[in-house]
Image (cartoon, rainbow, N blue to C red):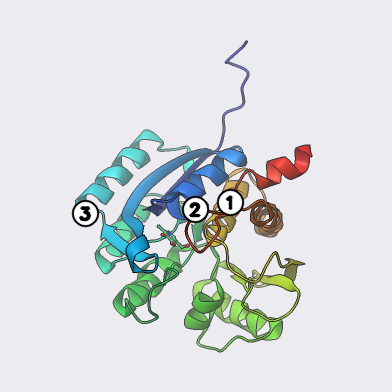
Amino acid sequence: MSFETAPRPAITLTIAGSEATGGAGAQADLKTFQELGVYGITALTCIVSFDPKDNWNHRFVPVDAGVIADQLEAIQTCYAGSLDTVKIGMLGSPTTISTVRSALQNQDWKNVVLDPVLICKGQEPGHALDTDQALKAEILPLATFVTPNHFEAESLSGITITSVEDLTEAARIIHEISGAAVLAKGGVRIAGPDAVDVYYDGTVTEILSAPKVGEVAVSGAGCSLAAAITAELAKGATPLEAARTAKAFVTAGIAARVSSNAPFDALWQGGARAAVSA
Ligand code: PXL
């Protein structure tokens, strides 16, 4: 076996939280990166442990800002010159947001994919308005691609979304605010047989649609979608190609979802592989 001939994988960083049960967060990102053939790296921002004694609500512990800065220093020094693509997931506090912003500004990036996690399932809307404001002010302007879900698209655009037309308008508004390519996700939240997402990059509008698999959101779908976009961009895909590939990856992962003793299923990143080899 020759080790020299193996092509070097694209180096891809996720700045994200740990979700202990493995469905969402950094775990979902790394599994997605591995499935799509990029070399995954993580800087952990927080640890989320669902509470089975409290309706599976989130217990959230931030990682100390200095420790986040240390991780990013190690990563950015280790891969200086070869790391140009980053995904940003749950940050969770204004302190974490400014720490991450400083590190992002230490280098140039080709792709900054922001999954604007404003709220986790089970949290009350408005729980962390200061965090939401900081994310919009400090991280959104650095993003080249942003993937808001229904709630986040309403929050970022300021409009109410009940139809695909509304979702398209929200994608346009979020593009105007950020300058980024936008994939606004309707998921199961817009009525109808299909899970519809809208892509908009300032020029192209594309409706990405796949039949809904059940009516309940699956844990890890948003993280995996943004991670798949990140992996594809790191490999050189255009934003639209990345969005299409990611939608197919997530649709297959939802079809192959994993159930547990929690009241929600988790996406299985191996679903797309199983679909190809079946
Ligand atoms: O799905 C959003 C999300 C992102 N990151 C972490 C999470 C969650 C939701 O549970 O726990 C760490």
Query: x and y percent of residue 12 in the render?
Result: 50, 43
Q: Secondary structure at mark 2?
A: loop
Does the CB distance between marks 1 and 2 fall below 8 Å?
A: yes
**Dot in front, 3 or 2:** 2
Location of residue 98 with respect to 236 vertically, above or below: below
Residue receiving disc 3: 64
Q: Would residue 205 be seen by someone viewing this image from the given angle?
A: no
Residue type pointed to by label 1:
Val
Residue receiving disc 2: 23
Q: CA distance from mark 3 to mark 1?
A: 32 Å
Residue receiving disc 1: 258
Left or right: residue 107 versus residue 33 is: left
Residue type pointed to by label 3:
Asp
Q: Quadrant of the C terminus?
A: top right
Tell which of 83 and 212 is nearer to you.
Answer: 212
Q: Quadrant of residue 78?
A: top left
